Amino acid sequence: MTTVTHTPDLLRYTDVPNLSHGDVLTLHEEHLNSGLIALMRLGGYHSIRAVRASGPWIETADGTRLLDLISSYGALNHGHNHPRVVAAARWFDERGDPDLLKEFASPWPAALASNLARLAPEGLGSVFLCNSGTEAVEGALKLAVRSFRGERDRFVYAENSLHGKTFGTLQITGRDKYRGFVPRLPGWPMVPFGDVAAIEAALTDPGSERIAGVVLEPIQGEGGVVVPPAGYLRAVERLCRQHGVLLILDEIQTGIGRAGALFRCQAEGVTPDVLCIAKSLGGGVATIGATITRPELHAAAYGKIEDCLVHTSTFGGRGRACAVAMEALQVAVDEDFAGRSRRTGAWLREQLEGVRARHPNAVRSIRGEGLMIGVELETPDVRVPPLLPRERIRSIATKYLPGVVGAELLHEHGILSSFVLNNPRVLRIYPSLLATREDLAGVPAALDAVLSKGLGRLTGRLLERAVRRDGVRAVLSMVSRW
């Protein structure tokens, strides 16, 4: 008996450019993330289709140019499609070298690891290559525990931190919204960011003999672009040395020049035991991350033949990604990402301080280093449209406040910006590190114009437009997801 099976018609990659935008939204809602599309609808982002991008600029289907101040949350320090990075990818493809082959010693990860060791703080010479930031941090946690042979298996971490969304990294993420069903482990101290005394207490409290390391971001990105007090990292480094625990620094957002140094810890002369990087390591073209550590730690964890395959990644260190990352690092050095970030960032923050001075009731602070900038907004009094639940809408408006400003900047000024995940009042400004003053010249005036309309009025208008466009029921459905 012959069984007849039906083979579905599949979309070909050549079909994708010809999909209508309505079809794209439907496919997203049906097969990806309907809640995200609902959020996009609230701010009108759903109507935009990006078709090309170069440097700090994005072009939409109707020919509009948008200035990108998000840079894919720090993954596009090089901007979109940097020609040298794209050329490296094409060069590798044309060679025909094996891309994914783990049975032999490949020259590509070896060469990239050598370059990372040369650029990292002195003494960090062993590298584990992976695919993302959360994997890099997972690798750091596992490395730390194994280097102590399991005798130490706890970590100190900071409130409002975000180190990833996999099960392990959620254990050191300081916001319950993203932890979901992951319980807080007893004996894993969560301390205020920037508080040296709190870390010292955590390292001396009962049970501290089980602590393997302290995990920190040099600047908390998703926490609201929070810069710690001067000398904080150096003081924490001293405490870690004193108590025999590892200092693990997550430079996934701050690294590759974003905060004014190739790695932010170098600005304070701090050498961690483990350094985690990803995002812009791939130059916006490759998907790659890395955990960099001291050779003796790596040897303790994985140096024996029976241990060398305990922690691996199928796609980590594939040839093409390594070649692209090598060129991304070379571009960062050749084009002085750290210096450009410091100079342009200082100028832009000064301009934004002028905006804050003109709107003291709307802007609480401008903070950051390099081109890692946060604009903290004051919560306004919102005029809630009729038929919508007043207190619920006020709560949503508070959480979505930077999104309201971002929507206005997008639709009225052609500027793409975003909120940070762990602080509902902070607008993220992360342009490409190659963006010029000319590229960014219109940002302060645009923000000034938006704030002049009043944050409460803008929030009410956004909700009214959503009601007119989608109806009360749809808007109630949207806000119920928050």
Image (tube, rainbow, N blue to C red):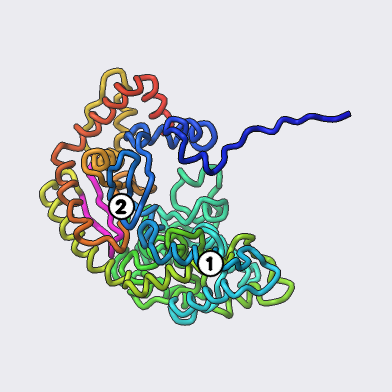
Residue at figure coordinates x 44%, y 62% from the top left? 86
Residue at figure coordinates x 53%, y 64% from the top left? 321
- Is 448 situated above or below 255? above
- Amino acid carrying label 2: it is Trp
Per the model, the C-alpha gap separating discs 2 and 1 is 26 Å
Whether pointer 2 and pointer 1 mark residues with C-beta atoms closer than 8 Å, the reply is no
Rendered image quadrant of residue 339: bottom left
Q: Main secondary structure of the magenta part?
A: strand
Q: Is residue 214 visible?
A: no
Rendered image quadrant of residue 438: bottom left
How packed is label 2: few (under 14 Cα within 10 Å), some, or many (20 or more)? Answer: many
Q: Which mark is residue 92?
A: 1
Residue segment shown in magenta: 364-379
Tell which of 193 and 337 is nearer to you.
Answer: 337
Tell which of 194 and 122 is nearer to you.
Answer: 122
Specify whether 420 is left or right of 286.
Answer: left
Dot 2 corresponds to which residue?
Answer: 57
How packed is label 1: few (under 14 Cα within 10 Å), some, or many (20 or more)? Answer: some
Residue 127 position, x and y percent, is 55, 72
